[in-house]
Amino acid sequence: MRVGLHALGIGDGARPEIIAAVATAAETHGFARLWCGEHVVLVDAPSSRYPYSADGRIAVPADADWLDPLLALSYAAAVTSRIELATGVLLLPEHNPVMVAKQAATLDVLSAGRFCLGIGTGWSADEFSALAVPFAGRGRRTEEYLAAMRTLWTEDPASFAGEFTRFDAIRVNPKPLRGGRLPVVVGGNSDTALRRAVRHADGWYGFNVPAADVPSHVAVLTDECARHGRAFDELTVAVALSDGTPRHLPALAAAGITELVIVGAPPPDPHAAATWVAELARTWITRKP
């Protein structure tokens, strides 16, 4: 089981010197992957309930700096050479899929094939409204956009006709480095998200998951794999726990979790941020199964 770090792009983690300090320290101390999430819009009084906390509120203040994850990860790629990079997650239905296909492939090329695209459907109706994207149907839109993007990554010229997007005989380059195949994981803790991960993606990323809920989530993945003729071990299964301690590591590995993601906010000083990463590594990486 690998250990990833979700700590870039928000607040002090949005500052370039902190990104560089965290990214280089994470690579040095054995973290497998750097994760970076997305919100284009936050509002002071959200009308939608945040699905990843007990009180339904996101912990990030609405006025906090929150970087575009593809740009933040491009910066991290430039100061590292081995550690993998992933969006955790990019809210795909809020974007033009042709643009995301181009941007994601560009990041994959610039990082020498280290990028994984984590996608989600989004939960904030306010955010969708501000972007003039319908909130209803965002699940179908996500699935279609991913299919369109995979067409662009593998065909040249590429054509696609769907409910939400269409193009005919266009060329979008560069292509991802791994034979036109960019790894994609689906985020979200609902059964719908878990099933979407099996049907359409290469893995799942659960965020702020109680440790006690991990077996039931894995069971949904396993059942859906059986329904669709997929082997469970084809999937990458990453989780960020809401209540994780090192004592959970053996059980997570036994359940089939392939990556534990540590979520945290780095301190504002670059030296302190590097030390913070080293301390996380001593806590989590040296004790992993």
Image (cartoon, rainbow, N blue to C red):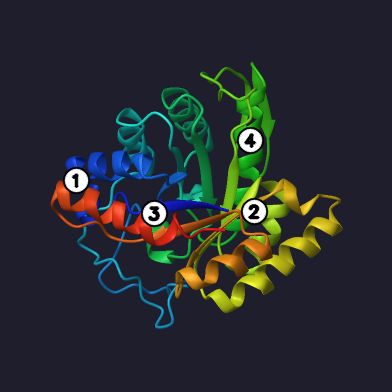
- Element type where label 3 sits in the image: strand
Whether the residues at callouts 3 and 1 have beta carbons within 8 Å, the answer is no
Q: Mark 4 points at which residue?
A: 148
Residue type, mark 1 in image: Arg
Task: Determine the image quadrant of residue 253.
Answer: bottom right
Left or right: residue 227 versus residue 205 is right
Kind of residue at disc 4:
Ala
Q: Name the residue under label 2.
A: 140
Q: Which image quadrant for residue 47? A: bottom left
Residue shown at the point (69%, 34%) measured from the top left: 161
Q: Which of marks 1 and 2 is nearer the N terminus?
A: 1
Identity of the residue drawn at 43% across and 76% down: 53
Return the residue found at the far left: 269
According to the picture, the residue beneath numbered tag 1 turns out to be: 15
Calculate the distance from the C-alpha at mark 4 to the C-alpha at mark 3.
Answer: 28 Å
Mark 1 closeness class: few <14, some 14–19, many ≥20 residues within 10 Å:
some
N-terminal label among 4 and 2 = 2
Under mark 3, the amino acid is His
Rendering coords of residue 166 (x, y %): 62, 33
